[in-house]
Structure formats: structure tokens, C-alpha cells
Amino acid sequence: MDIYQKLAAELPQMSKTQTKIADYILNNRNSVSFYNVRKLAQLAGVSEASVIRFSVFLGFKGYPELREALQEATQQHLSVKDRLIMSYHAYQDNEILDVMKDDVNNILQTLENTDIEKVKKICAEIISAKHIFIISCRSAASLGTFFWYYLNMILDNVTLITSLSDDIERLESVTSEDLFIGLSFERYSKATYQMMKFAKEKGCKTISITDTLLSPLIPWSDDYLLSCTKMPTFLDSFVAPLSIINMLITYIGRAKNTDLEKRLQEYDNIWNTFDMFL
């Protein structure tokens, strides 16, 4: 059962204060899942300590775990318009800096769940691939473009695909020596899913950078890195996946430092020739 079903099932055993919190959560699903403990306590008319005890009563270690469960249950059913409306309630004018705090929390949560040995293994697979295809459509295209720019600077064998019309004919000649990296987050791009499925069925190595193990990319991925992107607005927080990309690029750059130094010197010469920068 999801968290809302659990709340309903536990209502008969709740105290008066706990019932008050549960009622508020059940009646405000589209906004409450992104409130901090102070805001939920204020709006439910209880103390912050009561909210924390309520979280433990439900079997969570604390309010952050309850909040995460609420977010996961809620975001599966929200349209972009719903998320925009939700943001009006999540961030008041005097709380707008909480957007940055949520970004920080996304990075910290992603860091906590990232295994360094898996990172090294993925970097080795990227370095050894004959050709690399970065698949990132719709809003994730911005992440893919950044990843492609720096990874291609290091390896010079990277293709970026951001839609089914981008150089799609190249996919017909892929082999098991090629590697596909798919980037997609809730609400997942159908085009990214289709291309990752195609790559896996062609025998290519596949890696996904996505948000949860429930992501539709996971079944078509040989390996994956998970990144937290939760944000109570109509946009996703791409700070944490961008940090993962920075980490991969930095590690690969160190592993290929000799080649990279030579290539960067060549780039510098070209940039200076054409007076590229102020």
C-alpha cells in the first residue's frame, strides 16, 4: 500500500493530534508532500514535535522519510499544471530561498545513495566504449547537451540525441561495442525509453541516469545511477543529476589526463586563433 492508504488504515489507532495531522495530509495531497516540518505543523495546527512523533508512529525514522514517501506517492499523479499550482503553496515569497535548500537536499540525498565502486565501473565502461550515444529528450536535453560537450572534449567519440529526429539513422549501425547513456526523469520521455529499449535489444551496453528504481529505463539498463530531482514546482530540480555528470566527467578526465591535456592545448590554440573569448 502507498503512504495515503497507510494513513487511512492507521486512522482508528491515532490520537486526536495525530488524526488532525493525518486529515490535513489526506485533504491537501498536492501541496503537503513538499512542506517542511515547520510549515506542516503550522498549517495542521499542531507542534513540530507532534509532526515528528507522527512520522515515527507511521514507521518512519523521522519526518524527512515521511516527506519522501508523500512526494513519491504524489508526483506519480501530478500534471505539470498541478505542480505549478502546488508551487504556489510550497514556497511563499519569504521562503523562496527554500528552493535552493531543496536543491542542496537533493544533492545530499543523491550523494548518500551513490556507490563509488559503481561510479568507477561506469566510468571504465564509458572509456572503453567504441562509440557513446547520449540520449536525453525534452527537459533532460539540457543535461545531455552539457554532458555531451565535455565528454566529447575528452573522448571525441560521443553523439548526442535529443529527439527521434536527431541523427536517428546512426542507430541502425550500432554494435555491442557501443554504449548508450539515457537520461530521463519523472515524467519520463517516451522517446528516450524507446531508444534505450532499442539499444538493449541490439546488444549495446546501456547505462541510465534516472530518479528511482521504478523508472522505465531501469529494465533496459545494464547499470544505472540514481539522482534525486524532487521539487514542488512545475520544473524538475536538475542540480543533483548535473552533479553526477560533473563527477563522471571529472573522473574520466583524470583517467584520460594525458590525452585531455593535449586536446585542450589544441582547443586553446584554435580558440586563440579565432579570438573566441573576451
Image: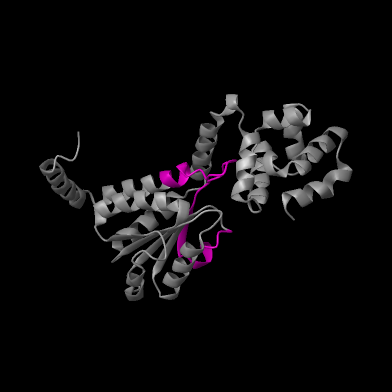
Q: Residue at point 71% right, 32% down?
A: 40
Q: Position of residue 72 (x, y in %)?
A: 64, 49
For residue 210, side relative to residue 40 (left or right)? left
Residue furthest toward the top?
94
The quadrant of the picture occupied by the N terminus is: bottom right
Judge whether residue 62 can be spotted in this image: no
20 or 53: which is nearer to us?
A: 20
Q: Which residues are magenta?
A: 214-243
Q: Position of residue 5 (x, y in %)?
A: 78, 52
Q: Is residue 234 magenta?
A: yes
Q: Residue at point 47% right, 45% down?
A: 238
The quadrant of the picture occupied by the C terminus is: top left
Count of numbered circles in the view: 0
For residue 83, side relative to residue 161 (left or right)? right
271 or 206: which is nearer to us?
A: 271
Judge whether residue 93 can be spotted in this image: yes
259 or 229: which is nearer to us?
A: 229
Magenta segment main secondary structure = loop
Q: Residue at point 79% right, 40% down?
A: 22
Q: Position of residue 170 (x, y in %)?
A: 32, 70
